[in-house]
Image: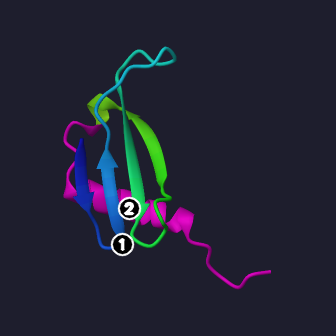
Amino acid sequence: MNTFSTKDGVVTLSKPYSTLMCDPQQIEVKYTPNNYHGWGICKSFNAIECSDFGQADAEVFALNAESKLRITGEAA
């Protein structure tokens, strides 16, 4: 399992795993913000797609995930 620290949280890659629904092995990439009490967002990828996953990729994933976790604007 790989872990990357980013500006606002942590990006973690799981070990490759197999599923009945998908032939290639999968990896789950999870972003956990520093101030969300363990909540986060994750996405599964084919393991081959993440073979060169590095700090720059973690920063991009975190930035994209942050945009989906945070609600902008005023509450209704």
- Secondary structure at numbered mark 1: loop
Chain part drawn in magenta: 50-76
Q: Is residue 12 left or right of residue 69?
A: left
How far apart are labels 2 and 1 at the CA level? Answer: 8 Å
Looking at the picture, tell me which residue is in the foreground, 64 or 1: 1
The residue at the far right in this view is: 76
Q: Determine which of the numbered discs, if any, sits on residue 62 in the image.
A: 2
Looking at the picture, tell me which residue is in the foreground, 46 or 7: 7
Q: Mark 1 belongs to which amino acid?
A: Asp
Q: Position of residue 54 (x, y in %)?
A: 20, 51
Query: Is residue 3 placed above or below 50 in the rendered structure?
Result: below
Q: Mark 2 belongs to which amino acid?
A: Ala
Badge 1 density bin: few <14, some 14–19, many ≥20, Cα 10 Å = some
Q: Position of residue 38 (x, y in %)?
A: 46, 60
Query: Is residue 18 placed above or below 73 in the rendered structure?
Result: above
Which residue appears at 40% of the width and 50% of the height? 30
Quadrant occupied by the C terminus: bottom right
Q: Position of residue 53 (x, y in %)?
A: 23, 46
Which residue appears at 36% of the width and 19% of the height? 24
The residue at the far bottom in this view is: 74
Residue position marked by numbered label 1 in the rendering = 8
Q: Does the CB distance between marks 2 and 1 fall below 8 Å? A: yes
Quadrant occupied by the N terminus: top left
Which residue appears at 48% of the width and 57% of the height? 40
Q: Quadrant of residue 50?
A: top left
Q: Give the number of marks.
A: 2
Looking at the picture, tell me which residue is in the foreground, 68 or 32: 32
- Secondary structure at numbered mark 2: helix
Badge 2 density bin: few <14, some 14–19, many ≥20, Cα 10 Å = many
In this rendering, the label closer to the viewer, 2 or 1? 1
Q: Determine which of the numbered discs, if any, sits on residue 56 in the image.
A: none
- The question of residue 16 being in magenta is answered with no
